[in-house]
């Protein structure tokens, strides 16, 4: 594989597991230096130690803007530039909207949405100064399906979609490229408790990282994969109500399970 990211410096939030860890591996294989940032430092160290000397582990809480900004400035000072910033950290919760405690909504939004705001702003300010760089914000293809029982998660990712599309237009004048990534189901530990349906099976995490980086490499503004999710994206744009019958089935089944308990 050609080393398209040779000598570039990347920060990946949530880099200690799942997609973040797979991105770190593939980026270093293509010549990048990677800062594996995760709130769980032990996990970040495990990932960084496997990167052949091209990885560095740091602890960061994406809900704390001061920590994120300090990390970005430190990386810029140490390496001379910040070329890539991946807003990948995230969590999800499952259940009917009214059953989820408000505290859980607040926690999820602070990580999935405000954490991306923090990373985007901190990285953009540095990249604007240097007039180069790429910000990659990870959303989800669930913004097209608006899956019942995932209201908090989908709400947070809709915010990421809006932020990224606006920032992409603002940043292009400074030669900073901003990408939105809306992947389908990925086989990561976060997905295991809720197995995807036959209609939307999960893809291996290494394949997801490869497809994502291919889109970043080509400077695509919106990266959606795999193909079946691009078809769902197009269908949603054509008719947002098209999947409502399926959504109602999901809700009825969930409510029936609750009554049977």
Image (cartoon, grey):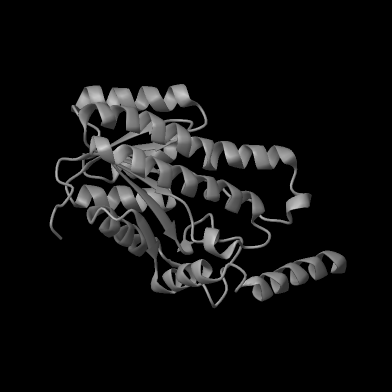
Residue 166 percent across, percent down from the top left: 42, 43
- The answer to which of 234 and 11 lies nearer the viewer is 234
Q: Is residue 66 above or below residue 139?
A: above
Residue 229 percent across, percent down from the top left: 45, 69
- The answer to which of 222 and 32 lies nearer the viewer is 222
Q: At 40% from the left edge and 54% from the top edge, which residue is drawn?
A: 181
Q: Quadrant of residue 167?
A: top left
Residue 84 percent across, percent down from the top left: 28, 41
Q: Is residue 163 visible?
A: yes
Q: Quadrant of the N terminus?
A: bottom left
Q: Quadrant of residue 123?
A: top left
Q: Is residue 216 above or below residue 250?
A: above
Residue 176 percent across, percent down from the top left: 27, 39
Q: Is residue 218 above or below residue 177?
A: below
Lateral position of residue 23 relative to residue 232, left or right: left
Q: Residue furthest bottom?
A: 198
Lateral position of residue 14 relative to residue 126, left or right: right
Q: Is residue 45 visible?
A: no
Lateral position of residue 33 relative to residue 196, left or right: left
Q: At 27% from the left edge and 30% from the top edge, which residue is drawn?
A: 128
- The answer to which of 172 and 96 lies nearer the viewer is 172
Q: At 25% from the left edge and 33% from the top edge, which residue is drawn?
A: 82
Q: How many numbered discs? A: 0
Q: Quadrant of the C terminus?
A: bottom right
Q: At 25% from the left edge and 45% from the top edge, which residue is drawn?
A: 51
């Amino acid at each position: 594989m050609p080393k398209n990211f040779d000598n570039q410096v990347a920060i990946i939030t949530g880099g200690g597991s799942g997609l973040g860890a797979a991105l770190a591996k593939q980026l270093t294989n293509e010549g990048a230096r990677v800062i594996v940032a995760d709130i769980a430092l032990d996990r970040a160290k495990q990932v960084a130690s496997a990167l052949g000397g091209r990885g560095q582990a740091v602890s960061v809480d994406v809900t704390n803007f001061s920590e994120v900004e300090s990390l970005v400035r430190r990386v810029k000072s140490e390496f001379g530039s910040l070329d890539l910033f991946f807003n990948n950290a995230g969590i999800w919760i499952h259940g009917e909207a009214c059953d989820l405690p408000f505290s859980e909504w607040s926690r999820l939004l602070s990580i999935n949405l405000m954490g991306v705001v923090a990373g985007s702003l901190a990285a953009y300010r540095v990249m604007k100064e240097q007039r180069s760089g790429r910000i990659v914000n990870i959303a989800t293809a669930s913004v097209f399906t608006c899956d019942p029982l995932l209201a908090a998660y989908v709400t947070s990712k809709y915010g990421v979609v809006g932020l990224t599309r606006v920032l992409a237009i603002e940043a292009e004048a400074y030669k900073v490229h901003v990408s939105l990534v809306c992947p389908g189901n990925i086989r990561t530990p976060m997905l295991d408790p809720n197995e995807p349906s036959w209609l939307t099976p999960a893809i291996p995490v290494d394949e997801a990282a490869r497809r994502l980086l291919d889109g970043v490499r080509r400077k695509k503004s919106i990266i959606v994969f795999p193909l079946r999710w691009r078809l769902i994206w197009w269908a949603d744009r054509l008719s947002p109500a098209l999947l409502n019958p399926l959504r109602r089935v999901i809700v009825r089944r969930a409510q029936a399970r609750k009554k049977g308990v």
